[in-house]
Image (tube, rainbow, N blue to C red):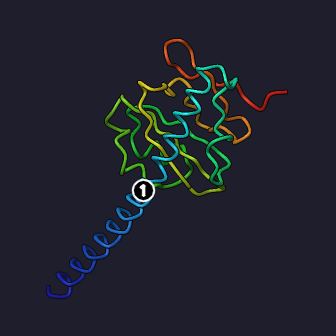
Amino acid sequence: MLKFARGCLVGLAVQAIIGAVASINFEKDKKHRQLLADRLAMAISEYENGAVSAVDFASFATFEWDTLFVIGPYTPPARIDATLGGFWLGSRLTSIDSSDRIALLVFKKDDNVVQYLEYPRNLADFAAVVRESGYAREESRFIIEQDGDMIWVGGEEN
């Protein structure tokens, strides 16, 4: 019985450590997510002012990534895992599964999530451009309709 209790305590301790490390990384990356949100807001503003022809993620998401996934409101973590091709702890740290106020933008490089952003739908609504296969970096260009819905316009301009 004592061995069982010790085993349970070790298991709980390991889970607590994993949770603490995930939480630390979550907070550390919060600053990077805010920078990304600010850059996206600026790109949207430039589009709305006519300075650019599209909101082009490749131009302002300057970290290394190759695929952008747009996850719609109320998507459960298991569905996010399936879309991304494997378990992603970050989906459990967002409010996407219980909120219709955000879309989740997830950036992957090879098989790893390198960044994500919970983006308010009232600023720009990415829910209409959810696509299971994601968007390659070179095709991650969008325009905005009058009602705020994002529309995919594809690859680089000719």
Q: Residue at x 63, y 42 (%)?
A: 60
Q: Residue at x 68, y 48 (%)?
A: 66
Within the image, what quadrant is residue 110 found in?
bottom right
Q: Residue at x 25, y 73 (%)?
A: 12
Q: Residue 131, how many percent across, how many down?
A: 59, 32
Would residue 39 appear left or right of 141 to someone viewing this image?
Answer: left
The image shows residue 92, relative to residue 17, as above or below, that is above
Would residue 96 appear left or right of 60 to someone viewing this image?
Answer: left
The image shows residue 55, relative to residue 117, as above or below, that is above
Q: Residue 141, how many percent across, how many down?
A: 67, 31
The image shows residue 2, relative to residue 77, as above or below, that is below
Residue positioned most to the bottom: 2
Residue positioned most to the right: 158
| Label 1 crowd (10 A; few <14 / some 14-19 / many >=20) | few
From the viewer's side, name the closer residue of 40 and 125: 40
The image shows residue 40, relative to residue 19, as above or below, that is above
Within the image, what quadrant is residue 46 found in?
top right
Residue positioned most to the left: 1
From the viewer's side, name the closer residue of 54 and 139: 54
Circle 1: element type: helix
* Quarter placement of the C terminus: top right
Would residue 142 appear left or right of 98 to someone viewing this image?
Answer: right
Q: Residue 34, how many percent across, how many down?
A: 45, 46
Residue that mark 1 sits on: 89
Q: What amino acid is labelled 1 in the image?
A: Leu
* Quarter placement of the N terminus: bottom left
Q: Residue 118, how many percent across, how many down?
A: 43, 40
